Image (cartoon, rainbow, N blue to C red):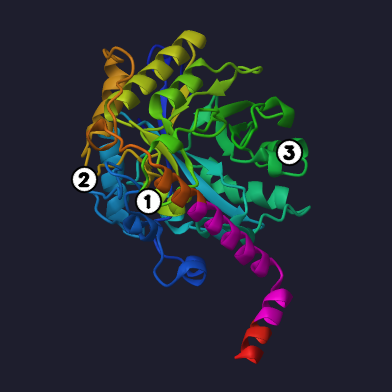
Amino acid sequence: MKNIDVSNKECSKYPPGLIAFYLTQFHPVPENDTWWGKGFTEWTNVTKAAPLFDGHYQPHLPTDFGFYDLRVRATRHDQIRTAKQYGIDGFCYHYYWFSGTRLLNQPLDDMLADPESDMPFCLCWANENWTRRWDAAEHEILIAQQYTPEDDLNFIKSLIPFFSDPRYIRLNGAPFLIVYRPQHIPSAKKSAQIWRDYCRTVGIGEIHVCAALTHGNMDYKQFEFDSGVEFPPHNIQCKNIAESIPFHDPFRGYVTNYQSVAEIYLERKYRHTNVFRSVFPSWDNTPRTGNRAFVVLNATPENYQHWLAESIRKTMKEFPGQERLVFINAWNEWAEGCHLEPDRKFQRQFLEATLLAKNAGSDLMGFSKTSELMNGDMPRRTLFRDLYSLFAYHTMRFVGQIIGLLKRFPRIRKIIRWIIHYRA
């Protein structure tokens, strides 16, 4: 398949195209060297992860492609061959653009210049500030979205080489663009209109602008966009079962079950219905956030196959006779424990589940409830253990607040340093 174009009615009898989100973080760049240390890539976070409780699957380590560097073109060719083999119809690359500054763009630009990378693709503008959230200092901005008066036009101009490529994914002939956080754009309606007008002027024609349903946003129409796309695990309200898990150290994050997340998405109704369904194979961002992680238990290939198969089935039922897309989050979000690429525990099982869900649906009787905890048993809670955890939790939180305060007010930090030095 050289292209995905919904205007091709001959394809309407087939299941929705499966599009996997794709992260380009796996190569060093000067900015990450400065912010996180020389040679930093996503693998830096992945390999430092450790289990938070007995039976916790961390770290996730790769097999087939190894600890790859996306500056190596052969790696992308291998990924594309494997993705196609298991039913993936295209990649959606995250696009990092900050008022003309592009980050992590080398693999994307090389893909565009490489005709042997014969995989349909589209872009998702990751339009949020980069902060030090990985070490809990979200107020410290590394690079910000400016949204200057010139940004709307300059942004869409940067996309024209991609829109013009024959591999770019189109819906009814219109290039398909996702915006990750449209609610951050000061006037998203105006911005979208500028994008549309410019594309018409330069011969691209109409474009399809899709809002990612993230961070509380559930309505793409408010921005006058054409559609929305689910982005699990955003916008969920599942029970946090963290208190029932015997963590090795105090835990301040969120734990829930895969089935709970999947069922919320499968049953969700939207006021405006042109929403593309999305699933994830697994989710566990322990490598990035440690004891503040969001962990989804029982993310097995069988459960993933059921969620994906049901998403495909519901899509075909809700949009009969129409070519649609279903998104998978993600192909290679390794530091969020969210990847189709083979790992040491499951090998290619998630890829195999993808192909089965696409071609044969699901013969499974719903979701399985296999426990991720060691032997499925939890040690008895004790008063001493609970008191220790409570004390440690609030101590860590208090210290974190003090550190954050000192980072925000450097003058206070200087005064404290002076007092310590003077007393010494």
Determine the image quadrant of residue 203.
top right
Q: Secondary structure at mark 1?
A: loop
> x%, y% of residue 221?
70, 25
Instruction: Identify residue type, mark 2.
Output: Arg
Earlier along the polypeptide chain: callout 3 or callout 2? Answer: 3
Task: Verify CB contact (< 8 Å) between mark 3 and mark 2.
Answer: no
Would residue 285 be seen by someone viewing this image from the given angle?
A: no
Instruction: Identify residue type, mark 1.
Output: Asp
Would residue 27 be seen by someone viewing this image from the given angle?
A: yes
Q: Residue at x 73, y 28 (%)?
A: 222
Q: On the image, numbered disc 2 is attached to which residue?
A: 344
Task: Verify CB contact (< 8 Å) between mark 3 and mark 1.
Answer: no
Is 136 placed left or right of 182 in the picture?
left
Q: Please tell me which residue lies in front, 235 or 158.
A: 235
> x%, y% of residue 392?
49, 55
Q: On the image, numbered disc 3 is attached to which residue?
A: 188
Is 123 placed left or right of 285 in the picture?
right
**Nearer the camera: disc 3 or disc 1:** 3
Q: Is residue 389 above or below residue 233?
A: below
Q: On the image, numbered disc 1 is attached to which residue?
A: 114
Q: CA distance from mark 2 to mark 1?
A: 30 Å
Q: Secondary structure at mark 2?
A: loop
Instruction: Identify residue type, mark 3.
Output: Ala
Q: Quadrant of the C terminus?
A: bottom right
> x%, y% of residue 227?
61, 26
Earlier along the polypeptide chain: callout 2 or callout 1? Answer: 1
Q: Residue at x 71, y 48 (%)?
A: 152
Mark 1, Cα crowd under 10 Å, few <14 / some 14-19 / many 20+, is few
